[in-house]
Amino acid sequence: MNVVSPELLAQFDVPGPRYTSYPTADRFVEAFTVDDYERALKQRRNGGVAMALPLSIYVHIPFCESLCYYCACNKIITKHHERAEPYLRYLNREIDLHTAQLGRGQVVSQLHLGGGSPTFLNDAELRELMGMLRRSFSLAAGGEYSIEIDPRTVDASRLATLAELGFNRLSFGVQDFDPAVQKAVHRVQPAEDVFALMQAARQLDFDSINVDLIYGLPRQTPESFDRTLAQVVELRPDRIALYAYAHLPERFKPQRRIAAVDLPTGGAKIAMLSRSISALSEAGYVYVGMDHFALPNDALAVARRQGRLHRNFQGYSTQPDCDLIALGVSAIGRVGATYSQNAKTLVEYYDHLDQGRLPIVRGLALNRDDLVRRAVIMALMCQGEVQFEPVELAFLIDFRRYFAPEMEALQALAQQGLVVFNDSGIEVTEQGWFFVRAVAMVFDRYLQADRNRARYSRII
């Protein structure tokens, strides 16, 4: 793997979307209503081929026992575990409203529990939730069934319960092993606890175990993060997600507890990323793309090599492109050519369901241009190339003419060695793969028309 220079990383240290969808969620509108969503569900049910395609399901569990100061997720901080019981009851209502539209027994090939902290639920509650899902949907053999883990809320026994319930993929939220950094972000979890959990998970034979890391947190230095990386390499997870911390206290209230003076400088962040890429590459990890690394035999790395990588609201996936049913407060889904989002507060979420209506409050129906650009952006983000002919045949366009301004804009990236052109398409180079968001941004019509990009995280 080519070493990525700090200078090049610094050049592309600019805000930009993560492209878990296109158009991105900030383009959703309240004019998209529950009626539009139900229409999309009915079209799926009556759509023949679409009906035969497996579903993906995301369930949002918003509760956390304590506040992590860096967090930008939709969460509810509480030590009152009894709040889970009514939430599960309302989730069941939401599931029933979906099956009323889709029918029972639709095949699901991917399930992800996120939050918040899904492991806020106790074992009995997790059993109840999985029972609800299995009664309404058919979980396919060989599917991906994953859950986000707060290491402070589980032990070896709980991991065994997760395996018994059918989860085959775990994601541990580590962020940083340095005690000073953990204290600064209000998330203290000793490294030895995570190592013990990893050993237990290995013995339970989970298919894949991911570790989340964040660089750019308060009190971090390149040297301290080197030590965290060394511990992670020793931990040897199958996958590593390495995210840049986006300090946006005006948008995310918990971040106001972080003193800006404690944050590393831009140069230090660049050094952390550059050294992380080198350290993980030397340890045998493959850069899958967009902050993700995996061991060569992990399904994600294999999918990247074979051109079978996909992307959805949970990030990269090995599962084919499919409709995503989103359950729970604030959850975002995709059905057909629509995106939708649930109510963001429990009060509003419960109120919709009390009225017997799905809790959709905003979304988007994609137009033809959205669909064309989504195809191009996802091809770049997942395969690292876009071939002209398939796009031209699918959408009846002349690619070079339709995207003439974009082709011109890409010339600057081509001169830097990040993309190459040939007669049949555009290819992202090995070096360019680290900056694929910058390549995709060229094709984002909304972004090109909107110069207010401060809403986004930085692209590296």
Image (cartoon, rainbow, N blue to C red):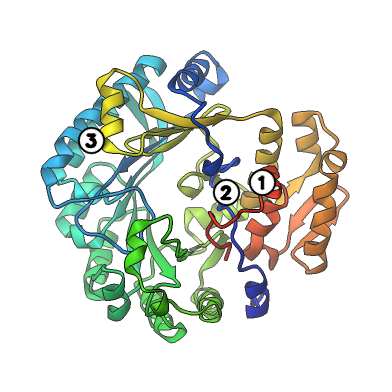
Q: In the picture shown, does residue 432 fall above or below 204?
A: below
Quadrant position of residue 220: bottom left
Q: Disc 3, disc 1: CB below 8 Å? A: no
Q: Nearer the viewer, residue 347 or 331?
A: 347
Instruction: Indicate the amino acid at tag 2.
Output: Tyr
- Percent of width and height locating residue 53: 51, 27
* Residue 404: quarter of image: top right
Between marks 2 and 3, how big is the CA–CA gap? 30 Å
Under tag 3, what secondary structure?
Answer: helix
The residue type indicated by label 1 comes to: Ile
* Kind of element beneath mark 1: helix
**N-terminal-most mark, 2 or 1:** 2
Evaluate if marks 2 and 1 touch, with contact meaning CB atoms under 8 Å apart. Answer: yes
Q: Where does the image place residue 32, in percent across and percent down from the top left?
A: 51, 26
Place of residue 263 in the rendered image (x, y in percent of width and height, measured from the top left): 42, 76
CA–CA distance in space, label 2 to label 1: 8 Å
Q: Where is residue 434 in the image (x, y as percent from the top left)?
A: 63, 65
Can residue 399 be seen in this snapshot? yes
The residue labelled by disc 2 is 19
Image position of 442 (left or right of 165): right
Label 3 vs 1, first from the N-terminus: 3
Where residue 377 is drawn, which disc sits there? 1
Residue 129's tag is 3
The residue closer to the viewer here, 283 or 440, is 440
Query: Which quadrant of the rendered structure holds the C terminus?
Result: bottom right
